Image (cartoon, rainbow, N blue to C red):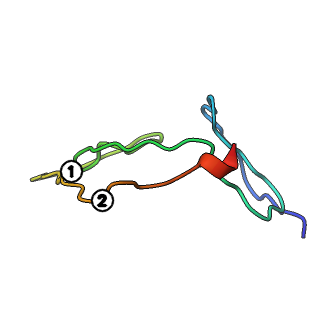
Amino acid sequence: MPATIIGGIKVTSVSGNGTVNMGDVLQIAPKSTTKANSGAGGGNTGDFLQTNTFCSVTNTFDPDVKDAGVRGNN
């Protein structure tokens, strides 16, 4: 099924292991994974952001041993 794109497209940056897909796709598998902890609004990206945060607490407790395996995707 073809993709219909209405409006503008803006790709600011695709680096290293990034994926930009437009159209049909069966499966997109990650080649790498990372974990980051940030407070409220810390991961926002885009143009003309306005973030109003009164209080932010980040819980970094992570009891699991392994989060995501990508061994079979390379």
Q: Quadrant of the N terminus?
A: bottom right
Q: Which residue is mark 1?
A: 52
Q: Is residue 28 above or below residue 50?
A: below
Q: Residue at x 12, y 52 (%)?
A: 57
- Amino acid type, callout 1: Asn
- Amino acid type, callout 2: Asp
**Callout 2: 10 Å neighbours few (<14), some, many (20+)?**
few
**Can residue 24 be seen by looking at this rendering?**
yes
Residue 16 is labelled as none
Image quarter of residue 13: top right
Question: In the shown orientation, is residue 55 left or right of residue 1?
Answer: left
Question: In the shown orientation, is residue 48 left or right of residue 21?
Answer: left
Question: In the shown orientation, is residue 58 left or right of residue 50?
Answer: left
Of residue 47 and residue 63, the one placed in the foreground of this image is 63
Residue 72 lies, in percent from the top left, at: 66, 51
Q: Which residue is mark 2?
A: 64
- Whole-number angstrom distance, CA of label 1 to CA of label 2: 32 Å
- Local secondary structure at mark 1: loop
**Can residue 30 be seen by looking at this rendering?**
no
Residue 43 lies, in percent from the top left, at: 36, 44
Q: Residue at x 79, y 58 (%)?
A: 5
Image quarter of residue 2: bottom right
Residue 38 lies, in percent from the top left, at: 26, 44
Q: Residue at x 22, y 46 (%)?
A: 39
**Mark found first going from the N terminus, 1 or 2:** 1
Q: Is residue 5 above or below residue 17?
A: below
Q: Quadrant of the C terminus?
A: top right
**Callout 1: 10 Å neighbours few (<14), some, many (20+)?**
few
Of residue 7 and residue 38, the one placed in the foreground of this image is 38
Residue 30 lies, in percent from the top left, at: 62, 49
